[in-house]
């Protein structure tokens, strides 16, 4: 009898090199991404133990978290120290580096896919939780801790127990202005910010098949915000078309062989998952978060919920704390929330498609008085493409700041930190307390909503712009 396997099972089993099922197994790592924040201690550990990087040819380094977006000059002492450490470590071990000033520089989870380093069926790790982005290609991709970074550098393997599996079925057609960002926020709002804990999620369904690769990457990027180890999407013609245009994709007969293999990377019809969630998207509208985790989200125009209406004691306490921090009252309509900062960028929504969507909303308009908007391309390649299309002129004419590439305002470890109790509409992935700066109040939205919000100064759907 033939065993019916899921996509997750297939990729997992293809990479096991040692171990016992049900216990820790060692998986071979096809690609290891590193950056300046989570790698210095790992390299120090290698030196202390007299070890070298086992496969520098399967390791790529990125300067993205701490880098400035206004110049190529590293002025922050901590950021400069970490970047310089990465440079020394890469030079010592012969690791390719995408550094500040390089035309290929950018956020790891934007640069690696656009150059074709990410391909279906791979096992990919990085000391960054949003490594889950790469599951959009049918790869198993996950974030790891610094001790695991050291282990992978030394052995090119990772030891872990096989996660549980979850299938998420998006049924129905996508309504106007509803994007991948809204799909993932709607899902997390339904299952909770820890609703996929311990699982690898496979996203499926009619709505998914219509998403571009950029949209699929957004979806998988935020799998971790639901507590998942990773998110995956079976490769198809959309995947192949995207990869065919990248410089590191297979060529000639190797391409034909690769596509043949990729076509096998889909769940068998009878594959069993530990859990299945179905979400009809046909009635969805754009979402916004009202609290301090991505699961605290509602459709724009709905009211901020009253914690007293939440039955679960733990969730009720979390909602009470969130409202106290975020400075909102129960019953407040989310489309009346005033915003003074807008951030368009990050590994979630800093790709060319995201910039095109936002520019379409901003074209011929001005951002509201008192609103500061940063537009930060996810890579220098994205920035160059946007400038070739004239998108930067739209942003600048609207009053936004056009920046260099980097993680920027997504995470408060660089010069783009927000100071004071400001309220930000952000296309990034996390709205935790102090995530974007001390006392900053973050509302997660899609690029189109971010642009519309910048124009009105309050949370606004693009449909309102006409």
Image (cartoon, grey):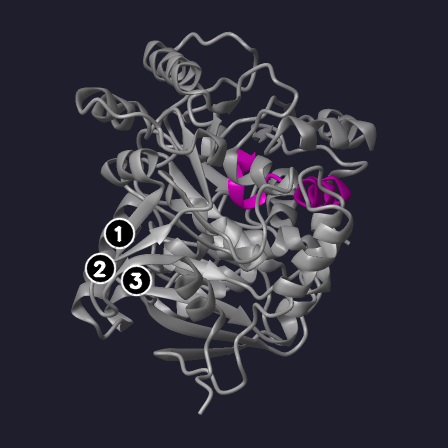
- Between discs 3 and 2, the one toward the N terminus: 2
Instruction: Find the distance from the CA under tag 3 to the CA under tag 1.
Output: 23 Å
Tally the numbered discs.
3
Q: Nearer the viewer, mark 3 or mark 1?
A: 1
Q: Residue at x 74, y 39 (%)?
A: 359
CB under 8 Å between discs 1 and 2? yes
| Residue 323 appears anywhere in the view | yes
Q: Secondary structure at mark 1?
A: strand
- Residue 175 located within the stretch drawn in magenta: no
Instruction: Find the distance from the CA under tag 3 to the CA under tag 2.
Output: 23 Å
> Left or right: 85 with respect to 132?
left
The segment highlighted magenta reads 339-361
Q: Residue at x 44, y 62 (%)?
A: 14
Residue that label 2 marks: 24
Q: Residue at x 62, y 59 (%)?
A: 179
Residue that label 3 marks: 194
Residue that label 1 marks: 159
171 or 267, nearer to the observer: 267
381 or 177, nearer to the observer: 381
Image x and y of residue 6, in percent: 47, 75
Image x and y of residue 305, in percent: 36, 64
Write down the quadrant of residue 201 in the picture: bottom left
What secondary structure is the stretch in magenta mostly built from? helix
Q: Residue furthest bottom?
A: 1
Disc 2 crowd, CA 10 A, few/some/many (<14, 14-19, 20+): some
> Left or right: 361 with respect to 99?
right
């Amino acid at each position: 009898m033939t065993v019916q396997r899921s996509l997750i099972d297939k990729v997992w089993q293809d990479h096991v090199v040692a171990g016992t099922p049900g216990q820790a197994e060692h998986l071979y790592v096809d690609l290891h991404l590193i950056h300046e924040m989570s790698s210095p201690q790992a390299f120090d550990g290698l030196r202390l133990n007299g070890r070298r990087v086992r496969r520098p040819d399967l390791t790529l380094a990125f300067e993205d978290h701490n880098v400035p977006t206004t110049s190529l000059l590293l002025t922050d002492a901590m950021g400069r120290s970490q970047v310089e450490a990465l440079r020394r470590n890469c030079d010592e071990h012969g690791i390719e580096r995408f550094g500040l000033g390089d035309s290929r520089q950018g956020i790891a989870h934007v640069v690696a896919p656009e150059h074709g380093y990410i391909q279906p069926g791979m096992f990919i790790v990085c000391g960054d939780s949003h490594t889950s982005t790469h599951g959009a290609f049918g790869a198993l991709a996950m974030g790891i801790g610094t001790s695991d970074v050291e282990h992978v550098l030394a052995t090119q393997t990772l030891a872990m127990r096989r996660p549980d599996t979850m299938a998420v079925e998006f049924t129905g057609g996508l309504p106007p202005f509803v994007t991948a960002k809204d799909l993932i926020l709607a899902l997390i709002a339904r299952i909770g910010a820890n609703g996929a804990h311990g699982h690898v999620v496979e996203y499926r369904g009619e709505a998914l098949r219509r998403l571009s690769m950029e949209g699929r990457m957004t979806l998988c990027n935020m799998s971790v915000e639901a507590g998942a180890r990773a998110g995956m999407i079976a490769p198809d013609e959309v995947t192949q078309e995207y990869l065919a245009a990248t410089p590191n994709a297979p060529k000639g007969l190797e391409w034909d062989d690769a596509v043949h293999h990729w076509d096998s990377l889909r769940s068998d019809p009878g594959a069993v998952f530990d859990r299945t969630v179905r979400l009809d998207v046909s009635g969805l509208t754009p979402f916004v978060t009202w609290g301090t985790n991505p699961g605290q989200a509602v459709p724009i125009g709905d009211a901020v919920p009253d914690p007293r209406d939440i039955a679960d004691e733990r969730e009720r306490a979390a909602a009470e704390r969130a409202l106290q921090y975020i400075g909102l009252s129960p019953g407040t309509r989310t489309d009346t929330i005033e915003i003074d900062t807008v951030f368009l960028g990050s590994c979630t929504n800093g790709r060319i498609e995201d910039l095109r969507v936002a520019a379409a909303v901003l074209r011929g308009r001005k951002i509201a008085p008192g609103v500061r908007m940063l537009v930060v391309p996810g890579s220098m390649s994205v920035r160059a493409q946007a400038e070739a299309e004239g998108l930067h002129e739209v942003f600048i004419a609207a009053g936004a700041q056009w920046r260099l590439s980097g993680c920027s305002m997504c995470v408060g470890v660089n010069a783009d930190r927000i100071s004071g109790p400001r309220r930000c509409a952000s296309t990034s992935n996390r709205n935790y307390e102090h995530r974007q700066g001390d006392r900053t109040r973050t509302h997660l939205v899609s690029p189109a909503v971010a642009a519309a919000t910048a124009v009105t100064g309050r949370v606004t759907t693009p449909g309102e712009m006409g």
